Image (cartoon, helix red, strand yellow):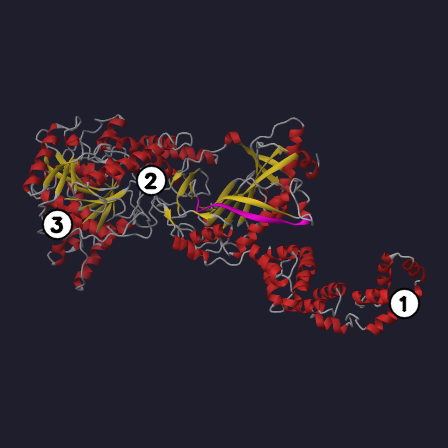
C-alpha cells in the first residue's frame, strides 16, 4: 500500500495528539520569579528554585494558572476547581530537581472539545463520514485534558554533528528554559486523518494566539506536538497497537509524519506482521519514522502529589474573572463574518481561522461593509497566494491594509475586473504603488461604457462568422469563446458582465 | 568578664546586652571560648563562623551605641542545624554528597533568627540528611551527649540539642520530621519545640519529607523557646505551606494554667516499651499539672500506633524524590565516570551513606506505579485517621501529655538494627503525621539512669501558644535546666 486512499479503503487510522505549549506571554517562570525567556544568553535566567538548589521551594505563578484556565475556557473544557500538582520523577540532567512538577489524574482543564471545519480539499482523505454538498465536513474532536507543568532545560551537545548527542564528546546545560510554564493538551483518539490532525493543530494554535498565552512558534519549539497513531480494520471496535511519533515540528511534518506512519503500519499489517508499541522519530529529510525506544524500556515515573504545593482551589469568582478576558474566538468570528458580511462559510472559516488574516481583514475593512466579499477574496486568493509563494507573513510583507482596502473598493465597485485586480496586485508588490495610482497611470480601468462595448462586440461578431452561426444553431456555450475574443480586443479592460450581456443582445438582433 | 553564659537564659542575656551590662562582642568571645573548651568533647559543630558572628555582634554593639532599639534576641549566641542554608557557610547535611557545598542563599528561618538579633556561631551536626535518631549517621563526626559522653545525643538534630546542653549556644534551630527535635531535646535535657506544620517557613532547609518537616528551636527555657518561635513564625511568600501566624507566644507565659484541660494518654505512658523511670517521671508530671490547677482528662488516640507504619511509607517516598536533585551535575560529590548514567549512580552511591541509600530505595519501591495503591495511598488514609484521632481528642482537652522517648539516651552502637532505631520515634511521629505542635520538656533525671527524661506535650494545630503556656507552667515545677555538669568540669 502506497497511499492513504489505498490504506483507508481497508483500515481506519486512530490518532491522538499531545500538544505542549510554552506560556511565552508570561513575565516569569512557573515556580520562581526568574525571567521567562529561554532564548537569552545561556544560564542567565536562573535562581536557586529553578536550578534545584538544596532547600529551594516552588511557588506557583498565578498568571500561569490564569492562562491555563483561559486555554480551557477557549477549548470548551470543564475547569476543575480542585486540582493538584504532582511530581513526575525521572533522572535527566536538563531537569534540575530530577522531577518535573506536573499534574495528576485531575488537571485544571478536563473534557473539552474543538469542532473542525474540514474544507473540501482536506476532506478527501476521510471516507467514512457524511459530508456537505461541497464535500466538506465537521469533525468533533474531544480534548481529554489540559494540565500545567514546567519545562526542562536544554542540552547543548558539543563535538558531534549538528549538535546531536551521537558522536558528541560532552554536553552543556542551559537552564534558562528550566521551569518555563508549559501546558500540555491531550486529545481523545478522535482524529482519523493526517489532515484532521493538521487542522486541529492549526485551529488550536490560532486559539492560543487569539487568547495571547503564547507565541506558539513551532519552529522555536514553544509549541510542540507528539502524535499517537494506530490502525484498525474498518468496522472494528478494538484499537490496534499504537506508536508514538515525535519531532513533528511543523504542520507539514505533522501531516507527513502521520501519513508515513499510517502507511508503514498498514504495510506491516498487510504482510501479516505486528505493530509494536514504541516511540518513533520522524525524519523529515529521509521521509521516514525510526524507532527511538520500545515499550519494554518505558519508565515508571513514580507520580505522587507534590508535598511542597498545597491542593489548588479555584473559586467561581476567579474562573468568572478569567472568563471576562476571553476574546472573540475563531468560531464566533466565522459566524459573525457570515452573518454581518455575507461571506461564504468556507471564506469566513478560512479568514477567521487565522488571527493574522482576520486582523488584517478587519483593519482593511474598517466600516466599509460593502467591500467585505471582495476584500475576503483578495486576501484569501491574491495575498495568501503571494505570501505562501514567498514564505512571508503579512507583517513581513510590505502590503498595507490601506492599499488592500483600496484594491477591494475598486473591485467591489466594478471599476476593475477580478482579472485586473490580480494584475494590479502584482504591480503593487513590484512597484510599491497604491492601486488607484496604478489603475489610473496604466489606464487599467474596466470599460463599462455601453457604447464602447457595443462597438467592440460588433467587431467580434463581424470577425467570427462560424461561431456566430454555431450560436444561432443553438450552441449556447460558444458565447464563452466570443466573450473571450471581446475581452482580448478590450485588452482585458472590458467589463465581462457587460460584454456578455451586450453580446447576447447583439446576437439576438441578428 | 563578670558574666557567664552558663547561668543566663537567652532572654536574660539579651536584656543584659540592651542595658549595656555586656557587649555582644564580649558575648561572642565567651561563646567561642566555651566552644573551644567543650566542643572537642561534644563535637556538635561542623563549622564555626567567627567572621559572621563578630560582624553580627559589631552591628548590635554599634546600634546600641547609637541608641537604636535592639531586636528581641539581640546578641544571643545561636547556631543552626547543617541542613539550613546560610550564605557564607557550607551546608553539608552531614553528608559526603555535600562536602564543601557553599550556600548560595539564606534559609528564611535562619534569616528570621538573625533579624531577631542572633549571633551565628556556626553549623551543627546531624544524622546524614536528617535520617536517624542518634546523629550516628553523620559522615563527618560523632556528636556526644553532654550528660554522658558515651551516649548519643539523639537525632537527627543531635548537634542542635547537644550544643545547648553543653552551654555552647543559647538557642539553636533544628528540624523535625518524625521527632528529630523532640527526641534529642529529651536525650540532652533541653527544651525542643516542633511547631505546628506551616508555622515556620521551610524555604532554605534541605528537605527530607516536605509534608512532615518543620523547623523549631532548642533552648534551656520555655521562655527562650517562645521568643525564638515569635521570631520564626511568619508567613513566607517563598513557602506556600507557611501560614500567616498572629499568635503572641510570649504574653501567654503567665504560669497560670488553672482550668486547662490536659489530656493524658495512659496507654502510651504505661506502654510496654517505656522504661520504668520514664513512667514514674511522667506520673509525677501529672501530679504537678494537677497541683497547678489543670484538669487531667483521659484521652485515646486509637490509630497512633499505626503512625510509625505510615511514617515509614510517607517519609521515604518524599525523601526519595527530594534527594533526586543530588545528581552531581550542578553541585555535590562527583564520582569519576565515563558516561552520564555511571556518573549519576556512582556519585550517589559514593556520596550517600547506607541509611540514606536505604530510605531512597525504600521510597523508590513504595512509589513504583504497581505498588502505589498498596503503600502510599493507604498511608495517606492512615494519616487522615490519625489526624482525626487528634481532632477528636482535642474536643475534650487543650493539650495532651505523653512520653517523648520510651527511654533515656542510649550508648553509641547500642542499637544497630535500623528498625529498632526507628522505634525511638514511636511517640513523636504521630504528631508530624497529624501536623500538630509538640514540645519536649525536661522533667528531671532518671532515678536509675541519672540521665535526662522528658515529657512531650502536644497541641491542636496552630495552638502552639497554649502549648508553650502549659510547658512554661510545668517547667516551673522543676529545678532550672543547667548546662551539663561534665561540661563545666575541668574548666
Q: Nearer the viewer, mark 1 or mark 2?
A: 1
Quadrant for the C terminus of chain A in the image: bottom right
As rendered, which of A399 and B45 lies closer to the eye? A399
Give SS at disc 1.
Answer: helix
Say the numbered circle drawn on residue B253.
Answer: 3
Coordinates of residue A14 in the picture (x, y in percent) = 59, 37
Give SS at disc 3.
Answer: loop
Say the numbered circle drawn on residue B99.
Answer: 2
Report the chain holding disc 3: B
Q: Judge left or right: residue B170 versus residue A498.
A: left
Coordinates of residue B131 in the picture (x, y in percent) = 29, 35
- Measured along the vertical axis of the image, is residue A287 above or below residue B24? above
- Measured along the vertical axis of the image, is residue A121 above or below residue A458? above
Q: Which of marks 3 and 1 is in front?
A: 1
Report the chain holding disc 1: A
As rendered, which of A363 and A59 lies closer to the eye? A363
Q: Judge left or right: residue A266 versus residue B83.
A: right
Q: How crowded is mark 1: few (under 14 residues within 10 Å), some or many (20 or more)?
A: few
Chief secondary structure of the magenta span? strand
- The boundaries of the magenta stretch are A107-120
The residue identified by callout 1 is A509
Q: Can residue A284 be seen in this view?
A: no
Q: Can residue B106 be seen in this view?
A: yes
Q: How crowded is mark 2: few (under 14 residues within 10 Å), some or many (20 or more)?
A: some
Amino acid at each position: 500500500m502506497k497511499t492513504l486512499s489505498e490504506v483507508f479503503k481497508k483500515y481506519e487510522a486512530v490518532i491522538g495528539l499531545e500538544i505542549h505549549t510554552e506560556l511565552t506571554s508570561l513575565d516569569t517562570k512557573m515556580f520562581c520569579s526568574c525571567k521567562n525567556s529561554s532564548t537569552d544568553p545561556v544560564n542567565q535566567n536562573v535562581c536557586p528554585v529553578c536550578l534545584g538548589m538544596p532547600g529551594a521551594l516552588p511557588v506557583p505563578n498565578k498568571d500561569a494558572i490564569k492562562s491555563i484556565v483561559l486555554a480551557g475556557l477557549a477549548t470548551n473544557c470543564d475547569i476543575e476547581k480542585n486540582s493538584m500538582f504532582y511530581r513526575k520523577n525521572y533522572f535527566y540532567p536538563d531537569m534540575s530537581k530530577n522531577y518535573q512538577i506536573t499534574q495528576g489524574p485531575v488537571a485544571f482543564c478536563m473534557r473539552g472539545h474543538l469542532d473542525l471545519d474540514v474544507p473540501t480539499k482536506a476532506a478527501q482523505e476521510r471516507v467514512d463520514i457524511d459530508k456537505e454538498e461541497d464535500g466538506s465536513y465537521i469533525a468533533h474532536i474531544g480534548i481529554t485534558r489540559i494540565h500545567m507543568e514546567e519545562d526542562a532545560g536544554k542540552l547543548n551537545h558539543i563535538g558531534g554533528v549538528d549538535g546531536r548527542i551521537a558522536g558528541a564528546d560532552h554536553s552543556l546545560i542551559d537552564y534558562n528554559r528550566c521551569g518555563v510554564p508549559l501546558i500540555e493538551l491531550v486529545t481523545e483518539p478522535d482524529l482519523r486523518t493526517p489532515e484532521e490532525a493538521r487542522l486541529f493543530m492549526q485551529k488550536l494554535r490560532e486559539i492560543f494566539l487569539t487568547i495571547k498565552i503564547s507565541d506558539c512558534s513551532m519552529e522555536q519549539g514553544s509549541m510542540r506536538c507528539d502524535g499517537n497513531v494506530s490502525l484498525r480494520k474498518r468496522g472494528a471496535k478494538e484499537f490496534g497497537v499504537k506508536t508514538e511519533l515525535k519531532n513533528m515540528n511543523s504542520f507539514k511534518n505533522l501531516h507527513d509524519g502521520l501519513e508515513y506512519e499510517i502507511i508503514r503500519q498498514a504495510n506491516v499489517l498487510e504482510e501479516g506482521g505486528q505493530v509494536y508499541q514504541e516511540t518513533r522519530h520522524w525524519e523529515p529529510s529521509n521521509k521516514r519514522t525510526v524507532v527511538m525506544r520500545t515499550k519494554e524500556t518505558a519508565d515508571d515515573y513514580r507520580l505522587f502529589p507534590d508535598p511542597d504545593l498545597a491542593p489548588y482551589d479555584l473559586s467561581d469568582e476567579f474562573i468568572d474573572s478569567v472568563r471576562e478576558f476571553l476574546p472573540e474566538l475563531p468560531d464566533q468570528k466565522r459566524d459573525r463574518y457570515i452573518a454581518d458580511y455575507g461571506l461564504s462559510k468556507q471564506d469566513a472559516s478560512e479568514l477567521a481561522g487565522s488571527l493574522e488574516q482576520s486582523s488584517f481583514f478587519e483593519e482593511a475593512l474598517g466600516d466599509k461593509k460593502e467591500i467585505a466579499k471582495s476584500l475576503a477574496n483578495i486576501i484569501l486568493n491574491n495575498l495568501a497566494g503571494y505570501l505562501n509563494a514567498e514564505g512571508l507573513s503579512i507583517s513581513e510583507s510590505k502590503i498595507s491594509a490601506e492599499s488592500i482596502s483600496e484594491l477591494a473598493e475598486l473591485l467591489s465597485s466594478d471599476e476593475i475586473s477580478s482579472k485586473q485586480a490580480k494584475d494590479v496586485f502584482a504591480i503593487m508588490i513590484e512597484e510599491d504603488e497604491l492601486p488607484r495610482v496604478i489603475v489610473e497611470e496604466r489606464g487599467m480601468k474596466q470599460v463599462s461604457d455601453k457604447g464602447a462595448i457595443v462597438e467592440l462586440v460588433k467587431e467580434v461578431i463581424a470577425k467570427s462568422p462560424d461561431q456566430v452561426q454555431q450560436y444561432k444553431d443553438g450552441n449556447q456555450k460558444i458565447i464563452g469563446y466570443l466573450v473571450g475574443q471581446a475581452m482580448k480586443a478590450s485588452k482585458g479592460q472590458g467589463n465581462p458582465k457587460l460584454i456578455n450581456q451586450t453580446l447576447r443582445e447583439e446576437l439576438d438582433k441578428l | 568578664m563578670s558574666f557567664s553564659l552558663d547561668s543566663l537564659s537567652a532572654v536574660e542575656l539579651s536584656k543584659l546586652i540592651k542595658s549595656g551590662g555586656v557587649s555582644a562582642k564580649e558575648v561572642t568571645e565567651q561563646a567561642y571560648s566555651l566552644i573551644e573548651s567543650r566542643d572537642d568533647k561534644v563535637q556538635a559543630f561542623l563549622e564555626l563562623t567567627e567572621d559572621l558572628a563578630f560582624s553580627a555582634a559589631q552591628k548590635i554593639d554599634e546600634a546600641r551605641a547609637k541608641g537604636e532599639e535592639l531586636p528581641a534576641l539581640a546578641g544571643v549566641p545561636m547556631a543552626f542545624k547543617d541542613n539550613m542554608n546560610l550564605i557564607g557557610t557550607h551546608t553539608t547535611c552531614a553528608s559526603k554528597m555535600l562536602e564543601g557545598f557553599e550556600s548560595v542563599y539564606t534559609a528564611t528561618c535562619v534569616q528570621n533568627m538573625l533579624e531577631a538579633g542572633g549571633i551565628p556561631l556556626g553549623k551543627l551536626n546531624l544524622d546524614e540528611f536528617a535520617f536517624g535518631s542518634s546523629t550516628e549517621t553523620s559522615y563527618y563526626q560523632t556528636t556526644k551527649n553532654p550528660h554522658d559522653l558515651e551516649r548519643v545525643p539523639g537525632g537527627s538534630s543531635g548537634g542542635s540539642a547537644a550544643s545547648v546542653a553543653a552551654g555552647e549556644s543559647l538557642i539553636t534551630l533544628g528540624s523535625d520530621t518524625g521527632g528529630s527535635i523532640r527526641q534529642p531535646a529529651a536525650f540532652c535535657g533541653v527544651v525542643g519545640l516542633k511547631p505546628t506544620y506551616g508555622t515556620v517557613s521551610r524555604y532554605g532547609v534541605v528537605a527530607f519529607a516536605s509534608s512532615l518537616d518543620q523547623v523549631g528551636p532548642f533552648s534551656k527555657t520555655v521562655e527562650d523557646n517562645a521568643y525564638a518561635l515569635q521570631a520564626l513564625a511568619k508567613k513566607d511568600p517563598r513557602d506556600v505551606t507557611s501560614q500567616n501566624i498572629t499568635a503572641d507566644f510570649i504574653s501567654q507565659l503567665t504560669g497560670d494554667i488553672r482550668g486547662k484541660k490536659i489530656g493524658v494518654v495512659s496507654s502510651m505512658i504505661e506502654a510496654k516499651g517505656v522504661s520504668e523511670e520514664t513512667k514514674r517521671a511522667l506520673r509525677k508530671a501529672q501530679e504537678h499539672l494537677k497541683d497547678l490547677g489543670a484538669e487531667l482528662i483521659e484521652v485515646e488516640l486509637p490509630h497512633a500506633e499505626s503512625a510509625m507504619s505510615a511514617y515509614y511509607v510517607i517519609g521515604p517516598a518524599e525523601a526519595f524524590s527530594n534527594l533526586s536533585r543530588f545528581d552531581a551535575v550542578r553541585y555535590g560529590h562527583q564520582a569519576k565516570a565515563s558516561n552520564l548514567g555511571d556518573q549519576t549512580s556512582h556519585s550517589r552511591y559514593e556520596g550517600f551513606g547506607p541509611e540514606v541509600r536505604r530510605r531512597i530505595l525504600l521510597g523508590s519501591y513504595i512509589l513504583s506505579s504497581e505498588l502505589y495503591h498498596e503503600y502510599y495511598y493507604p498511608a495517606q488514609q492512615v494519616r487522615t485517621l490519625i489526624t482525626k484521632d487528634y481532632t477528636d481528642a482535642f474536643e475534650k482537652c487543650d493539650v495532651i501529655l505523653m512520653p517523648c522517648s520510651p527511654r533515656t539516651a542510649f550508648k553509641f552502637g547500642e542499637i544497630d538494627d535500623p528498625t529498632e532505631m526507628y522505634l525511638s520515634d514511636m511517640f513523636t511521629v504521630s504528631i508530624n503525621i497529624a501536623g500538630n505542635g509538640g514540645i519536649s520538656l525536661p522533667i528531671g533525671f532518671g532515678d536509675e539512669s541519672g540521665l535526662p527524661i522528658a515529657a512531650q506535650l502536644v497541641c491542636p494545630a496552630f495552638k502552639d501558644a497554649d502549648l508553650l503556656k502549659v510547658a512554661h507552667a510545668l517547667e516551673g515545677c522543676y529545678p532550672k535546666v543547667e548546662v551539663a555538669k561534665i561540661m563545666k568540669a575541668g574548666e
